[in-house]
Image: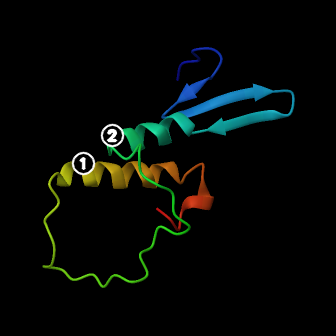
Amino acid sequence: MLDTGKLSFFLGISVMLDSNGMFLCQENYAKDIIKRAEMQNCKPSLTLVDLASKLEENVGPKIQNPTLYRSSAGALQYLTITRPNISYDV
């Protein structure tokens, strides 16, 4: 184990220290996920769930880049470590 000094950033988590303790933030990590998925200009919605759609296995176009989809899904799961309030949405 190696002490490299004051901790400020680790595994996508920004660490800020003050007199009250430690604050963990993944804002930059979340913005990077949105940028990689090219969703910067998407409009917000009250719910991420489309209540009217019926999903079927062989209907609709195939995902153009399944690697990007899998990477985004994994990154969003990792994001829930410090943001448990978004777990349902992810």
Q: How crowded is mark 1: few (under 14 residues within 10 Å), some or many (20 or more)?
A: few
Identify which residue is drawn at 26% across, 54% down: 69
Identify which residue is drawn at 13% across, 79% down: 58
Report the disc number at residue 68.
Answer: 1
In this rendered view, identify the residue nearer to me: 4 or 72.
72
| 2 vs 1, front mark | 2
Report the disc number at residue 54.
Answer: none
Q: How crowded is mark 2: few (under 14 residues within 10 Å), some or many (20 or more)?
A: few
Contact flag, marks 2 and 1 (Cβ < 8 Å): yes
Question: At which x and y percent is residue 48?
Answer: 47, 67
Above or below residue 41? Residue 62 is: below
**Residue 61 sits in which quadrant?**
bottom left
**Residue 26 sits in which quadrant?**
top right
Q: What residue type is labelled 1?
A: Leu
Q: Which amino acid does label 2 sit on?
A: Arg
Question: At which x and y percent is residue 13?
Answer: 55, 35
Q: Is 37 placed left or right of 8 in the picture?
A: left
Q: Is mark 1 on a helix, strand or loop?
A: helix
Above or below residue 86? Residue 41 is: above
- Residue placed under numbered mark 2 in the picture: 36
Question: How many badges with numbers are in the image?
Answer: 2
In this rendered view, identify the residue nearer to me: 66 or 81.
66
